Each structure stands twice: as structure tokens, then as C-alpha cells.
Image: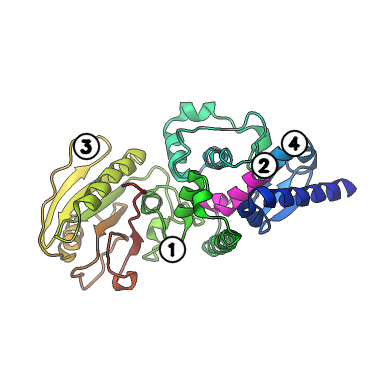
């Protein structure tokens, strides 16, 4: 159809214009398959391809075309479609648009159509964090309407399989690395984009975002399964409104700095506040296990840390083995540098190691998943 052909030419011209203004995003756009179809209302992405309605596209100004093209490219490159998992699609779309539109607002030469969604007080958060806040504040969520001209739709109604999720993740991370090679320096990126890239960087994951996903009640990655149990290969069906018991061990041996300890405890409060279904039990551990202390979003001041000696991980896991009820859905989170004695047998629960500073190499941990604590700059 000639009409569609003309729109394809206009989109190609827009990519060339984007290359002059924002080469990083222009390079990313080359990794997306661009389609034109009357079957979509405005524009959409399924995580790999981007589809524009021809009538909608022609009505945009040149600057808006660059903005809408970048809007959809960012949804794809930042993996917003596969990251949704089984979350409510409409609410997730709002959260993702808040992040993406906040990034575009700081890009010179790009505009978004009138009435686009902006929530500056939420833009510094991850999509997962925004979604959870909106889920808890339904009144605010109901007041946020995604304009028709920026409605991100998805042809992928069901969560992706483990294999397809990995393929999309690897594909777009290669695209991001290629786009960085265009000469775009990270210091020239909007802060919101820097945060999002840090959250999906497989070599330097933001530990807090990872921990949020580790504790969340809805799977963010895999079809029908809960990510919390992937490390142990325990593929358990996700259940709505379930409670999670989080056994949280803080290494209080002499090698853990007060700065790391303070940072972890403050972030722990934020995570528990966002996930009221998580029941937290805190333990301080060096060569002995002190606790448990119940922690939640409404907890009083946390007890002062106890310890300061050597490091032995076994007492914590031995305690959990005796205290944990088999019917409870639970995970173990251990903040440590990894230098210590491990138990001979792994526990029967998923384990997330949050490592700090100079720490044991990942291969040195005999079980569980390992994520590095990466504080914000200035902390």
C-alpha cells in the first residue's frame, strides 16, 4: 500500500534526524523492526518490533515524531514488555510511561504530543517500584490516564518464557552496547536513563531493584513461575496475595563497614514499605546468630547490631532450618562480603547473597544467587 510505504519513508527520515540530535537513540532504533499497520490505534511495541498507525504518525509534528519514536524504542530497549511478567498491563503501562516520558523530557530536540503523562516525583524510581506504589494508591492511579497517542500496547499478552526473556534481554543489551559505541558518553544521558540502564546492566545490576524483584509477589520475568525460586531451580506456581517470609541476615563481623550496614538497613525499610505482604525477620550474624527481630514498614527503631568477630554463615542457616515452617513461602537474604565459613549443605530455601565492597568472587558461593550492592553516587 502506497500510504504505508510513504510512512515508512518518513520514519526512516525521522531516524536520520534523530541521528543528528541523539545518536544513541537513533542507533537503538535500528535494532527495532519498524512496522506500519491500521490495526493499532497509535503506536505500540511487543518488545522487539514497533508498529505505528499511519494516520497517527502523519498527524505528528517533526519533533513529536522523534519523541514518539524514542518513546517506543525506550520501551523496547529497557525491556519494559518482558519485565511486566503477570502484572496488570494497564497499570504497568502507566508506570513504564512515567519513566520513559521523564527521560524524553530531558532530551533536546524531542517532544511528546500534548497531554502526555508526567509524574516528576516518581520518575527517579524503577518501573517495578512505581507500579507497586500505584497499586497501593489506587486513587492516584485512577487519576493517571495514558493518552491515546502514547498508549503502549503489547501483542505479548502472556508473560514470556524463560528462554524468550533471555533472548530479548541479550538482544537489547547488545543494542545498548552498540549504541554506546556511537560516541555517546554516559555523562550526557538524562539521569533517569542512567538509572534504568544500571538496573538492567547484567554486569552491574542495581541491587535494590534486584531485591525488589526477588521479593515481589508477582513474577517479573518468567511465564507462570516466580523468579524468587529460579536460583534453586524450584519452579513454583506464583500465587496472588501470598505472604512471603524473608529471613534477612546481616553480617556484623569486623569486615563489614558501618556505611554498608547503615545503607542496607535504610533500604530494607523502603522495600518492606512497598511490599506489605513481606514478613521480615532480621538476624545479626558473625560467628553467632543474634535474633530474630521482626521488621516491617511500621517497625520501631531497629535494635543495634551485635557482633564484630569472625564470620560463619552456618549458624544463620541452622537457625532457619529449625524455625521455618515448611508450608511458609520464604526466602533468605544475606548481606555480607562473602569471606567466611559456609555450611556443608545448602538450605532448603532460595538464597540471595548481597555482597559489599571487596568481596568473595561469585564462583566462591556454593549456592544461591549473588548480587553486588551498588549505592547511589554520593552515598
Q: Which residue is mark 1?
A: 203
Q: Is residue 96 left or right of residue 259?
A: right
Residue segment shown in magenta: 66-87
| 2 vs 3, front mark | 2
Label 3, secondary structure: give it: loop
Mark 3: give few (<14), some (14-19) or many (20+) Cα within 10 Å.
Answer: few
Q: Which residue is mark 4?
A: 61
| 1 vs 4, front mark | 4
Name the spot of residue 130 as percent of width and height, x first: 46, 39
Give the spatial CA distance, label 2 vs label 4.
10 Å
Precedes in sequence: disc 2 or disc 3 = 2
Q: Main secondary structure of the magenta part?
A: helix
Precedes in sequence: disc 2 or disc 4 = 4
Of residues 114 and 138, which is closer to you in this image?
114
Asked if residue 208 shows in the view, the reply is: yes
Give the spatial CA distance, label 3 vs label 1.
34 Å
Precedes in sequence: disc 3 or disc 1 = 1
Q: Which residue is mark 3?
A: 299
Precedes in sequence: disc 1 or disc 2 = 2
Amino acid at each position: 500500500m502506497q500510504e504505508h510505504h510513504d510512512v515508512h519513508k518518513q520514519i526512516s527520515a525521522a531516524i536520520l534526524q534523530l541521528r543528528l540530535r541523539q545518536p544513541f537513540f537513533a542507533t537503538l532504533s535500528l535494532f527495532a523492526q519498524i512496522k506500519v499497520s491500521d490495526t493499532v490505534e497509535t503506536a505500540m511495541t511487543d518488545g522487539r518490533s514497533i508498529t505505528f498507525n499511519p494516520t497517527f504518525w502523519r498527524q505528528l509534528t517533526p519533533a513529536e515524531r522523534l519523541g514518539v519514536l524514542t518513546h517506543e524504542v525506550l520501551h523496547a530497549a529497557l525491556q519494559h514488555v518482558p519485565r511486566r511478567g503477570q502484572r496488570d498491563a494497564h497499570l504497568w503501562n502507566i508506570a513504564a510511561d512515567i519513566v520513559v516520558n521523564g527521560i524524553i523530557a530531558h532530551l533536546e530536540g524531542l517532544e511528546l504530543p500534548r497531554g502526555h503523562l508526567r509524574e516528576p516525583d516518581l520518575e527517579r524510581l524503577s518501573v517495578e517500584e512505581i507500579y507497586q506504589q500505584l497499586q497501593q494508591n489506587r486513587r492516584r492511579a485512577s487519576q493517571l490516564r495514558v493518552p491515546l497517542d502514547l498508549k503502549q500496547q503489547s501483542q505479548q499478552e502472556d508473560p514470556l518464557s524463560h528462554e524468550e526473556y533471555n533472548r530479548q534481554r541479550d538482544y537489547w543489551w547488545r543494542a545498548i552496547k552498540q549504541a554506546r559505541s556511537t560516541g555517546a558518553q554516559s555523562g550526557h544521558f538524562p539521569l533517569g536513563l542512567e538509572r534504568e540502564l544500571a538496573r538492567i546492566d547484567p554486569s552491574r545490576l542495581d541491587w535494590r531493584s534486584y531485591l525488589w524483584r526477588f521479593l515481589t509477589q508477582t513474577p517479573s520475568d518468567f511465564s507462570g513461575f516466580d523468579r524468587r525460586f529460579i536460583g534453586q531451580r524450584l519452579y513454583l506456581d506464583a500465587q496472588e496475595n501470598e505472604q512471603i517470609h524473608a529471613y534477612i541476615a546481616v553480617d556484623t563481623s569486623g569486615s563489614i563497614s558501618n556505611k554498608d550496614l547503615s545503607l542496607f538497613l535504610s533500604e530494607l525499610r523502603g522495600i518492606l514499605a512497598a511490599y506489605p505482604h513481606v514478613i521480615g525477620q532480621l538476624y545479626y550474624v558473625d560467628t553467632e546468630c543474634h535474633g530474630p527481630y521482626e521488621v516491617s514498614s511500621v517497625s520501631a527503631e531497629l535494635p543495634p547490631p551485635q557482633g564484630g568477630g569472625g564470620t560463619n554463615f552456618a549458624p544463620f542457616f541452622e537457625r532457619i532450618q529449625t524455625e521455618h515452617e515448611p508450608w511458609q513461602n520464604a526466602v533468605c537474604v544475606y548481606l555480607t562480603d562473602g569471606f567466611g565459613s559456609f555450611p556443608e549443605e545448602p538450605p532448603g530455601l532460595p538464597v540471595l547473597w548481597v555482597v559489599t565492597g571487596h568481596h568473595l568472587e561469585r564462583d566462591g558461593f556454593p549456592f544461591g544467587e549473588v548480587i553486588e550492592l551498588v549505592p547511589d553516587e554520593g552515598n
